[in-house]
Amino acid sequence: MLGGNATKAKITHSKGSSNLVIQAYSLETGEGGLLVNEIGGYSGTRPLQAPALVEVTADGKWTISPA
């Protein structure tokens, strides 16, 4: 769960060599879907309507925070 009222999320993935897949869905509207599908490291900001349910599939270390 990503709380708050952010409209963007900062996402990082390091020390991984497989896919980073992140899907997020707004708790208020249910809208959302795929945010990131990258192989290897990743760093970026993506639109996300918080509060949201976030599903992360990754190897390595990852972070996601309101931006």
Image (tube, rainbow, N blue to C red):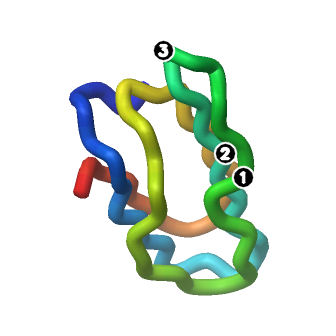
> Considering the numbered disc 1 on the image, is that residue within a helix, a strand or a loop?
strand
The correct choice, above or below, for 8 with respect to 26 in the image is below
Name the residue: 49% across, 72% down.
Answer: 13
State the residue in front, 24 or 31: 31
Q: Quickly name the residue at label 3.
A: 28
> Considering the numbered disc 2 on the image, is that residue within a helix, a strand or a loop?
strand
Q: Quadrant of residue 51?
A: top left
State the residue in front, 1 or 31: 31
Q: Quadrant of residue 40?
A: bottom right
Q: Earlier in the sequence, mark 2 or mark 1?
A: 2
> Considering the numbered disc 3 on the image, is that residue within a helix, a strand or a loop?
loop
State the residue in front, 29 or 58: 29
Horizontal and vertical percent position of residue 58: 66, 59
The correct choice, above or below, for 8 with respect to 13 in the image is above
Name the amino acid type tagged 2.
Gln
Q: Earlier in the sequence, mark 2 or mark 3?
A: 2
Name the residue: 65% across, 30% down.
Answer: 31
Distance CA(mark 2)–CA(mark 3): 16 Å
Dot 2 and dot 1 residues touching (CB under 8 Å): yes
Residue at the top extreme of this rendering = 28
Name the amino acid type tagged 3.
Glu
Q: Quickly name the residue at label 1.
A: 34
Q: Quickly name the residue at label 2.
A: 23
Name the amino acid type tagged 1.
Leu
State the residue in front, 51 or 17: 51
Name the residue: 33% across, 47% down.
Answer: 7
